């Protein structure tokens, strides 16, 4: 009997070794996966134009991994239809708002935690690392399941430091502010203001002076678009010393103890009285409160708009357009740090960012383990470089120092075609799932940090002039970041009084702000504002504030 037991045990060990050799019971070697082609359908709301499966970078990824992606794009309405019909693709990337939580409750999503542990240990470790905010804990459900990952979050390993470390008190900010601020056109601002604009009074003087210089009807001292209300509100709150989070509705705080719905802040009324004054004095684009974002960008791209109050992406888009035209190539929109109402600081953003979109794998996916193994490859040096840099010799080079880099010629190709990355398939997965910041040799995993871009030749020539002028804004937001994970990833249960209140309040926000902008008098602005606040209180916005407050304080207490 003992001999039979020993033989059985020996046979069992042999069987396990045989199965392990074939990849069963552990992550399958990439060389084996590459021999077995598979196609995953991925639906994303993150891009409007997707790269084709035969885009050079995606085609090369398929050659190396055996994985092809059929990419579909759409909006939240399509997500709702899929949820109702249960007709899902393999993978979905969606906004992290109410639609995500509807999917999380559906029971139709794959628990990624055991799959990552088994097939993608690198990915699992980085999501669980304290240096990345213990995202596994943040994203896991109460019963321990991990039903989604997020995107556009630069992941670090222990000991690494982000090249744009938001919490570095000596940080020099290379890119435009990532929150909502006041932007003005340079060098026009230098001509009319002579120095950086630091408050609303100086801003008013500057736009008046610019309009006097350009009296034509197709010149606009200030512009906006009909959907910009929340951006303008966020800019105003920051200017008055509030820390603002916009995810799930604007909630604001001055002391990180009391949180309010931003529109109710007492400083909001005087700010929109100021904007209304700009409108009544003929300084605001009269079409601004009703025009689309595309119409606004079209005007800004002519160089005939002096300023706007809003998000950095509008500035990026307009600045790219200005640079491409000979007549406007020397113009650039730059931020101004305005402070009002006795505030000591203009806060920029919460550095405890965890991504604005979520990637989920649905139970319609026939081989979720294979998709997870693809993610592990994506986190390898090979995967990161291919996705974010492209193909060597075509999209990047190895320079004389042995580092990945961009040449002036490649840089020019990228700048000449706004769809370059899409056509090539570069950074598609960076828009889908969190990606590491560095490869294992310490080099940047993304071409945005190529050595070329830190040289004078690689800098935006307009920004070189800005930096050498009194309008150099790159140090203005030093120390204006905060980091509080308790303030992110809040969830308001659907159909609760809090959820209904925030939905109704947000629904009237943009129209209310547009109405205040075009009001005939300050008294009318006050009336519109008071009626809107009363409506929001009637909707029960205080219940939403209480829920936000409760969740933040509970998360903070749990962590401490």
Image: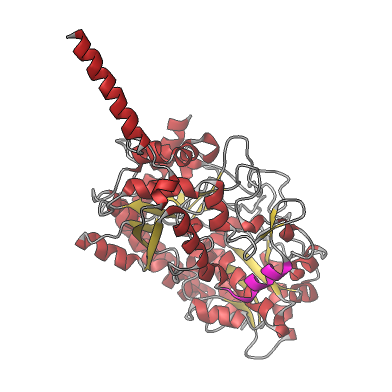
- Indicate the position of residue 239 as horizontal and vertical percent values: 61, 58
Look at 73% across and 45% down and name the residue there. 170
Give left or right: position of 284 versus 192. Answer: left
- Indicate the position of residue 554 as horizontal and vertical percent values: 41, 36
The residue closer to the viewer here, 302 or 23, is 23
Total numbered labels placed on residues in the image? 0
Look at 63% across and 70% down and name the residue there. 414
Residue extending farthest top: 2
- Indicate the position of residue 137 as horizontal and vertical percent values: 41, 37
Give left or right: position of 526 versus 39. Answer: right
Q: Is residue 431 magenta?
A: no
- Indicate the position of residue 228 as horizontal and vertical percent values: 50, 70
Whether residue 208 is situated above or below residue 359 in the rendered picture:
below
**Residue 350 can be seen in this image:** no
Extent of the magenta region = 408-418
Residue extending farthest left: 1
Q: Quadrant of the N terminus?
A: top left
**Residue 392 can be seen in this image:** yes
Look at 26% across and 23% down and name the residue there. 11
The residue closer to the viewer here, 349 or 542, is 349
Give left or right: position of 95 versus 90. Answer: right
Look at 78% across and 60% down and name the residue there. 455
Whether residue 75 is situated above or below residue 304 in the rendered picture:
above
Q: Is residue 412 magenta?
A: yes
Q: Main secondary structure of the magenta part?
A: helix
Residue extending farthest bottom: 216
Query: What colouring style does the render use?
Result: secondary structure
Quarter of the image where one finds residue 470: bottom right
Quarter of the image where one finds residue 136: top left
């Amino acid at each position: 009997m003992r001999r039979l037991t020993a033989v059985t045990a020996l046979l069992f060990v042999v069987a396990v070794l045989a199965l392990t050799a074939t990849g069963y019971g552990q992550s399958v070697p990439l060389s084996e996966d590459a021999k077995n082609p598979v196609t995953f359908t991925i639906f994303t709301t993150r891009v409007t134009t997707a790269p084709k499966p035969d885009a050079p970078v995606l085609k090369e990824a398929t050659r190396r991994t055996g994985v092809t992606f059929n990419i579909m794009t759409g909006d939240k309405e399509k997500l709702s239809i899929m949820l109702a019909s249960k007709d899902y693709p393999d993978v979905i990337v969606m906004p992290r708002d109410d639609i995500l939580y509807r999917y999380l409750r559906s029971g139709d999503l794959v628990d990624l935690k055991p799959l990552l542990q088994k097939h993608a240990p690198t990915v699992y470790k980085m999501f669980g690392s304290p240096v990345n905010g213990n995202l596994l804990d943040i994203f896991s459900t109460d019963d321990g399941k991990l039903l989604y990952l997020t995107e556009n979050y630069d992941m670090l390993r222990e000991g690494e430091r982000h090249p744009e470390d938001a919490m570095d008190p000596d940080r020099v900010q290379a890119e435009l502010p990532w929150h909502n601020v006041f932007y003005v056109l340079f060098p026009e601002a230098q001509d009319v203001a002579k120095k950086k604009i630091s408050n609303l009074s100086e801003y008013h003087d500057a736009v008046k002076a610019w309009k006097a210089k350009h009296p034509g009807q197709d010149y606009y001292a200030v512009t906006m678009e009909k959907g910009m209300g929340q951006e303008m509100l966020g800019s105003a709150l920051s200017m008055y010393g509030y820390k603002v989070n916009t995810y799930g509705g604007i909630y604001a705080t001055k002391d990180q103890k009391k949180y309010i719905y931003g529109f109710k802040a007492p400083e909001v009324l005087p700010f929109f009285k100021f904007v209304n004054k700009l409108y009544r004095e003929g300084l605001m684009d009269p079409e601004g409160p009703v025009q689309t974002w595309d119409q606004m960008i079209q005007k800004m791209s002519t160089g005939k708009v002096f300023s706007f109050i809003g998000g950095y992406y509008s500035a990026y888009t307009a600045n790219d357009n200005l640079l491409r035209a000979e007549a406007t190539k020397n113009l650039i929109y730059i931020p101004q740090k305005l402070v009002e109402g006795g505030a000591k600081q203009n806060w920029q953003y919460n550095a405890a960012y965890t991504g604005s979109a979520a990637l989920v794998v649905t139970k319609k996916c026939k081989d979720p383990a294979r998709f997870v193994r693809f993610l592990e490859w994506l986190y390898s040096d090979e995967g990161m470089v291919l996705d974010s840099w492209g193909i060597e010799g075509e999209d990047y080079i190895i320079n004389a120092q042995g580092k990945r880099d961009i040449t002036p010629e490649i840089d020019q190709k990228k700048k000449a075609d706004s769809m370059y990355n899409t056509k090539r398939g570069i950074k598609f997965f960076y828009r889908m799932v969190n990606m590491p910041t560095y490869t294992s040799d310490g080099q940047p995993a993304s071409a945005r940090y190529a050595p070329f871009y830190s040289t004078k030749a690689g800098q935006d020539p307009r920004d070189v002039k800005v930096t050498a002028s009194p309008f150099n804004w790159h140090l203005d937001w030093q120390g204006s970041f905060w980091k509080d994970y308790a303030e992110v990833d809040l969830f308001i249960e659907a159909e609760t009084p809090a959820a209904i209140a925030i939905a109704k309040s947000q629904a009237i926000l943009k129209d209310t702000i547009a109405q205040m902008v075009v009001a005939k008098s300050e008294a009318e602005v006050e009336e519109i504002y008071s009626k809107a606040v009363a409506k929001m209180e009637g909707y029960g916005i205080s219940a939403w504030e209480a829920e936000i407050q409760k969740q933040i304080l509970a998360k903070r207490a749990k962590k401490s």
